[in-house]
Image (cartoon, rainbow, N blue to C red):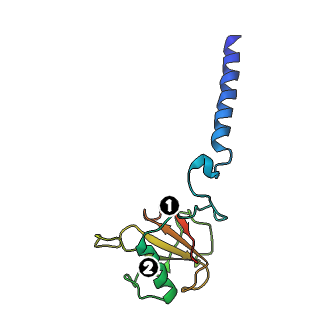
Amino acid sequence: MALPLILIIGLITLVAVVYSIVHDPDSPERTGTPQSNESGISECASIPPEATELIDDIHSGGPFDHPSNDGSHFGNYEQILPREDSDYYREYTVETPGVDHRGERRIVTGGGTETDPDVYYYTDDHYESFCEVTVE
């Protein structure tokens, strides 16, 4: 008789713990991270100055440091960004001081035009994670 009671108490405890972990996961008080927006991607707390310079270059149409890559199609194969048509996203290389290759940092833009995208995302880990950049 004691074993079923222990199992019931254990199950109730497990449900309570899981509920407390998953309940309102976007709450900044709970996660300590910036609030997510409609896309589900958190807003960037800050971006490096090289990314800000690149956004200015995007608005002016270049020139870009990697013209054969910058402004090219970004496939969103990792499916971290919101799903859109295949021609929606473009990627640009954010220069990394001291690195003699493209590195891991990128700005990915979406929608709009090449010089006035609707949305900007930043990654510093080669598409493993993104944050949304607010551009004014």
Q: Residues within 10 Å of mark 1 (few under 14, many from 20)?
A: some
Write the residue at 49% across / 89% down: 60
Q: Quadrant of the N terminus?
A: top right
Q: Residues within 10 Å of mark 2 (few under 14, many from 20)?
A: few
Marking on residue 103: none
Write the residue at 56% across / 76% down: 135
135 or 90: nearer the viewer = 135
Looking at the image, residue 104 sits to the left or right of residue 130; the answer is left
Could you say which quadrant of the image residue 9 lies in? Answer: top right
* Mark 2 lies on residue: 53
Amino acid carrying mark 1 in the image: Ser
Vertical comparison of 105 with 118: above or below: above
User: What percent of the width, then of the height, locates residue 51?
Assistant: 44, 74
User: What percent of the width, then of the height, locates residue 64?
Assistant: 40, 84
Looking at the image, residue 68 sits to the left or right of residue 82; the answer is left
User: What percent of the width, then of the height, locates residue 94?
Assistant: 41, 74
* Mark 1 lies on residue: 129
Pointers 1 and 2 in contact (C-beta within 8 Å) = no
Amino acid carrying mark 2 in the image: Glu
Looking at the image, residue 113 sits to the left or right of residue 65; the answer is right
Asked which secondary structure carries label 2, the reply is helix
User: What percent of the width, then of the height, locates residue 69?
Assistant: 41, 80
Asked which secondary structure carries label 1, the reply is loop
- Return the residue found at the far top: 1
Write the residue at 58% across / 81% down: 117
- Of the two numbered discs 1 and 2 on the same chain, state the one appearing first in sequence: 2
